[in-house]
Image (cartoon, rainbow, N blue to C red):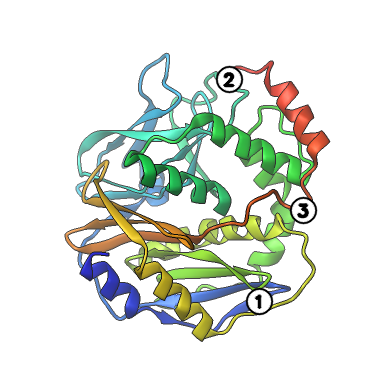
């Protein structure tokens, strides 16, 4: 691991946890103050400084164009969902868009049953892909040294999400599942706080670490706190284990020890900076850096094999059968 990245993780401060039943969230802090300025995707879209749209009128499932009209870079997070245009997508990788440029960005579809315009361009759906989906994408990118992700795998993960919650989306859209579970998600989120100076979260489910996300600047993290938290909540909801088991700070620190020991591969960023991919027996991860500053980092524990206990095989089979008649499969 690059020294500046390792040093950063070693100085991370772990705050007091907050609990919702057997779900724990630890706020993360840092004394390091970074200087690179950038906008977050949501604020850039709201200020009409960012336009994300299909690459052409006919479109390309795995590519979009992002036009940055600002004098500052704009940060897009890997796993963030984009809603609109011909079908909803998720970003394959975190990207720091160069100022005043158009960039082709790699994406995957999370709405297999639609290929028709709902809008000319995209907006933020306020969702980030759930933990297991991001985990598998990191593993694939590490092995391939590429930003491409198997599209069929992404569709299957959306199908599994539907089956696990017995929610059938008319267009096999990940967003429909998140929307259907919005009440339960809100019950979690109302009990978890954002703290002054917070730059990240680490989530634990039933005594097992799910992973963490860190944004290099507190104002950037505040902008995406809720959607990142929602991603981990969805993963906790996929398990119907009843046990209550909690971790303490020293056990969280041991996870960071595993993180800095992971094997590292560096790839040129899609936009500015470098993208580092990580893999070990315990974790997968990604770090986007620019000018030796960490812009976004995410490390996730490796899941045990198998599906969630509340996964419905018959429901999954019905989804697969229905999707054979949709636009993509």
Mark whose residue sits in front, 1 or 3:
3
Up the image or down, 311 lies above or below 231; here it is: above
Q: Is disc 1 surrounded by few (<14), some (14 to 19) or many (20+) residues within 10 Å?
A: some
Give me the residue at 47% from left, 46% from top.
80
Q: Is residue 285 left or right of residue 264?
A: right
Task: Specify which label sits upstream in the sequence, 2 or 1.
Answer: 1
User: In this view of the protein, which residue sits in the foreground, 248 or 224?
Assistant: 248
Quarter of the image where one finds residue 219: bottom left
Mark whose residue sits in front, 3 or 2:
3
Please state the total of marks drawn on the protein image: 3
Up the image or down, 219 lies above or below 174; here it is: below
Q: Is residue 166 left or right of residue 179?
A: right
The Cα–Cα distance between marks 3 and 2, rounded to whole angstroms, is: 28 Å
Quarter of the image where one finds residue 17: bottom right
Quarter of the image where one finds residue 116: top right
Mark whose residue sits in front, 2 or 1:
2
Q: Is residue 323 left or right of residue 328?
A: right
User: Mark 3 sits on what residue?
Assistant: 309
Q: Pinpoint residue 86: horizontal percent, then vertical percent.
A: 51, 23
User: Mark 2 sits on what residue?
Assistant: 328
Residue lying at the far front of the rendered structure: 281
Mark number, residue 89: none
Give me the residue at 67% from left, 36% from top.
159
- What element does badge 1 sit on? strand
């Amino acid at each position: 691991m690059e020294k500046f990245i390792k040093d950063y993780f070693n100085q991370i401060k772990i705050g007091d946890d907050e609990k919702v039943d057997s779900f724990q969230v630890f706020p993360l802090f840092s004394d390091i103050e970074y200087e690179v300025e950038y906008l977050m995707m949501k604020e850039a879209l709201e200020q009409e400084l960012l336009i994300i749209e299909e690459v052409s009128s006919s479109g390309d499932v795995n590519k979009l164009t992002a036009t940055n009209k600002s004098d500052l870079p704009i940060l897009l997070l890997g796993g963030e969902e984009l809603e609109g245009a011909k079908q909803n997508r998720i970003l394959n990788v975190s990207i720091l868009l160069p100022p005043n440029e158009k960039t082709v960005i790699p994406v995957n579809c999370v709405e297999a049953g639609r290929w028709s315009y709902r809008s000319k361009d995209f907006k933020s759906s306020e969702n980030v892909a759930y933990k297991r989906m991001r985990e598998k994408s990191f593993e694939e990118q590490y092995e391939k040294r590429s930003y491409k992700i198997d599209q069929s795998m992404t569709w299957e993960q959306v199908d599994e999400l539907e089956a696990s919650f017995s929610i059938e989306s008319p267009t096999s859209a990940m967003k429909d599942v998140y929307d259907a579970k919005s009440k339960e998600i809100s019950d979690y989120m109302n009990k978890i706080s954002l703290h002054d100076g917070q730059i990240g979260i680490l989530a634990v489910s039933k005594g097992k670490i799910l992973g963490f996300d860190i944004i290099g600047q507190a104002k950037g993290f505040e902008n995406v706190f809720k959607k990142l938290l929602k991603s981990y909540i969805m993963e906790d909801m996929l398990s119907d284990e009843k046990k209550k088991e909690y971790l303490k700070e020293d056990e969280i620190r041991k996870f960071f020890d595993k993180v800095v020991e992971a094997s590292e591969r560096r790839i040129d960023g899609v936009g500015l900076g470098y993208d580092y991919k990580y893999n070990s027996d315990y974790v997968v991860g990604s770090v986007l850096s620019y000018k030796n500053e960490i812009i976004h980092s995410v490390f996730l524990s490796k899941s045990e094999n198998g599906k969630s206990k509340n996964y419905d095989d018959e429901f999954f089979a019905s989804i697969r059968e229905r999707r054979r008649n949709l636009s993509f499969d």
